Amino acid sequence: QVQLVESGGGLVQAGGSLRLSCAASGSIFSIYAMGWYRQAPGKQRELVAAISRGGSTNYADSVKVRFTISRDNAKNTVYLQMNSLKPEDTAVYYCNAQIQTRNSGRSYSYWGQGTQVTVSS
């Protein structure tokens, strides 16, 4: 089986920074796209940033310039560096990865348990 474990959330003042990490473990053959989503109370889950295995990235317009996604393929880990945080960034942040396990011929989407990010004004 596969697990995605997130860390790095917390409470920060507006203008501050946080770095989220998400490590994948288990019977992994290959990890393709990885990404971060967020869900604020009463709102739908939305894509924040995504990164391909080769390093191509895309961002939601609301976080461009302020957030940076990166990955370490050797560690099966994806990061989200969040700078200049705003109260509207407050949400539960979820890690997602497309993973092919050793006993499968295709990849499946896996999710982390979520980590709370709260930005105070």
Image (spheres, grey):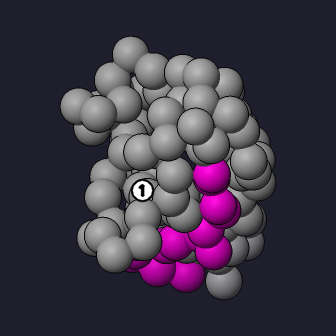
- Of residue 69 and residue 75, the one placed in the foreground of this image is 69
- In this view, 80 is above or below 102: above
Residue labelled with disc 1? 37
> Image check: 30 left or right of 57?
right
Q: How many marks?
A: 1
Q: Looking at numbered disc 1 in the image, what kind of residue is underneath it? A: Tyr
- Of residue 12 and residue 111, the one placed in the foreground of this image is 12
Image quadrant assignment for residue 82: top right
Q: Residue at x 32, y 52 (%)?
A: 47
Image quadrant assignment for residue 72: top right
- In this view, 60 is above or below 83: below
* Percent x, y of residue 77: 67, 45
> Image check: 60 left or right of 34?
left
Q: Residue at x 28, y 70 (%)?
A: 44
Q: Which residues are magenta?
A: 103-118
* Percent x, y of residue 57: 34, 29
> Image check: 5 left or right of 83?
right
- Tell me, yes or no, if residue 32 can be seen here: no
Q: Is residue 15 magenta?
A: no
- Tell me, yes or no, if residue 15 can be seen here: yes
Q: Residues within 10 Å of mark 1 (few under 14, many from 20)?
A: some
Image quadrant assignment for residue 120: top right
* Percent x, y of residue 93: 54, 58
Q: Quadrant of the C terminus?
A: top right
Q: Residue at x 66, y 25 (%)?
A: 16
* Percent x, y of residue 68: 50, 25
Q: Residue at x 50, y 42 (%)?
A: 87
Q: Residue at the far left: name it.
A: 61
SS at circle 1: strand
Q: Quadrant of the N terminus?
A: bottom right
